[in-house]
Image: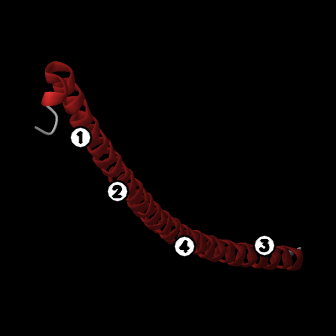
């Protein structure tokens, strides 16, 4: 009976040592898991920041290109407007001169023109 008791005690002690070993391995595995999760989070934050920076840079370039395009369109339109104004002014000046001659002729007859 003592022998059975000792055998049982040794088995229990062995099971206790095995359990402690398993607890230690589980704690180590958990620590590795936490470390890897933390590293993955750092990498994810870095990747997110890189993507965000690239998107902001792309947005700035696109906005600058569109501003330049709008400025070019505005300059072209301004030039065309100035040309139309100058053309209209020339045409109006010619008509004004013709109209003035017609008014003088009507008021003074043939005497007023070229006299």
Pointer 4 local density, CA inside 10 Å: few below 14, some 14–19, many at least 20:
few
**Regarding mark 3 in the picture, which secondary structure is present there?**
helix
User: Of residues 10 and 18, which is closer to you in this image?
Assistant: 18
| Residue picked out by circle 4 | 43
Give the Cα separation between the discs numbered 2 and 4. Answer: 48 Å
Q: Is 11 displayed left or right of 89 in the figure? A: right
Q: Tell me how many marks there are.
A: 4
Between discs 3 and 1, the one toward the N terminus: 3
Crowd around label 3: few <14 · some 14–19 · many ≥20 (10 Å): few
Q: CB atoms at circles 3 and 1 under 8 Å apart?
A: no
Identify the image quadrant of the C terminus.
Answer: top left
State the CA–CA distance, disc 3 to disc 1: 118 Å
Closer to the observer: label 2 or label 4?
2
| Quarter the N terminus occupies | bottom right
Q: In the picture, residue 63 is in which quadrant?
A: bottom left
Residue hosting label 1:
93
Cα distance between the residues tagged 1 and 4: 74 Å
**Which badge, 1 or 4, comes first in the chain's sequence?**
4
User: Could you say whether the residue bearing mark 1 is in a helix, strand or loop?
Assistant: helix
Say few, some or many: other residues with alpha carbon within 10 Å of mark 1 (under 14 / 14 to 19 / 20 or more). Answer: few
Q: Is residue 41 above or below residue 67?
A: below
């Amino acid at each position: 009976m003592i022998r059975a008791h000792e055998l049982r005690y040794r088995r229990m002690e062995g099971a206790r040592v095995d359990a402690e070993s398993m607890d230690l391995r589980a704690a180590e595995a958990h620590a590795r898991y936490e470390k890897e999760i933390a590293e993955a989070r750092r990498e994810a934050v870095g990747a997110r920041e890189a993507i965000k920076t690239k998107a902001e840079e792309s947005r700035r370039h696109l906005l600058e290109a569109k501003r330049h395009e709008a400025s070019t369109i505005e300059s072209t339109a301004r030039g065309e407007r100035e040309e139309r104004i100058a053309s209209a002014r020339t045409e109006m000046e010619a008509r004004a001169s013709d109209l003035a001659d017609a008014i003088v002729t009507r008021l003074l007859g043939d005497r007023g023109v070229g006299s």
